[in-house]
Image: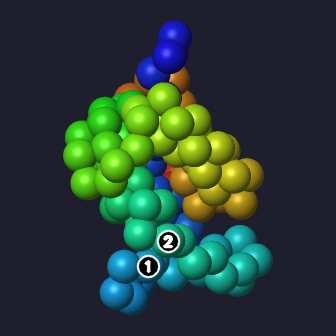
């Protein structure tokens, strides 16, 4: 991977863990998302400071029998999809709370 991708949870959502899944409701349009176990791991680790690649290697590949390149490809696709819905914020630089738009600060 040539670039680092950082992910942060949007503050414009409500979330709740149910077993291995994560339920997330968008504050934008009240859409409900259900994340599977792997996506929930990414969601919970998305602090804006840890690169997505580190989350995948340290938290996904260490728990599941998956090749890092395949897991990273799937994680990037998931992050892109969730960012389109305003669930995750993406950046090529670490995302600090002070760099978030006012409506995204927690």
- Whether residue 52 can be seen here: no
Viewer-nearest residue: 18 or 100 = 18
Q: Please, what secondary structure does the residue beneath circle 2 have? A: loop
For residue 12, above or below residue 93:
below
Residue 75's disc is none
Within-10-Å neighbours for mark 2: few <14, some 14–19, many 20+: few
Quick one: which residue is furthest to the top in this view? Answer: 2
Q: Residue at x 45, y 21 (%)?
A: 4
Residue at 48 percent across and 41 percent down: it is 71
Measure the C-alpha gap from mark 2 to mark 1: 5 Å
| Residue at x 71%, y 80% (from the top left corner) | 31
**Res. 16 in view:** yes
Q: Is residue 62 left or right of residue 10?
A: left
- The answer to whether the residues at label 2 and label 1 have Cβ atoms under 8 Å apart is yes
Q: Earlier in the sequence, mark 2 or mark 1?
A: 1
In the displayed structure, 58 sits above or below 78; it is above
Residue 77's image quarter? top right
Q: Residue at x 50, y 16 (%)?
A: 1
Circle 1: element type: strand
Instruction: Pick whichever, 11 or 35, lies toward us.
Output: 35
Where in the figure is residue 65, as x and y percent of width and height?
Answer: 34, 49
Q: Is residue 6 left or right of residue 60?
A: right
Q: Position of residue 7 (x, y in %)?
A: 46, 42
Image: 66 above or below 106: above
Furthest residue in direction front, as rendered:
65
**Residue 21 marker:** 1
Badge 2 is on which residue? 36
- Which residue is the extreme one toward the bottom? 18
Q: Quadrant of the C terminus?
A: bottom left
Residue placed most toward the observer, 2 or 11:
2
Expressed as whole percent of the image width and height from the top left, the position of residue 12 reads 55, 68
Task: Name the quadrant containing residue 34.
Answer: bottom right
């Amino acid at each position: 991977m040539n670039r680092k991708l950082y992910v942060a949870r949007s503050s414009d959502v409500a979330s709740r863990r149910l077993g291995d899944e994560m339920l997330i409701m968008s504050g934008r349009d009240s859409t409900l998302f259900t994340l599977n176990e792997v996506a929930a791991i990414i969601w919970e680790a998305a602090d804006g400071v840890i690169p997505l690649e580190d989350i995948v290697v340290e938290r996904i590949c260490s728990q599941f029998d998956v090749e890092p390149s395949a897991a990273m490809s799937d994680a990037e696709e998931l992050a892109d999809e969730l960012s389109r819905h305003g669930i995750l914020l993406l950046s090529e630089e670490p995302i600090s709370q002070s760099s978030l738009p006012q409506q995204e600060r927690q």
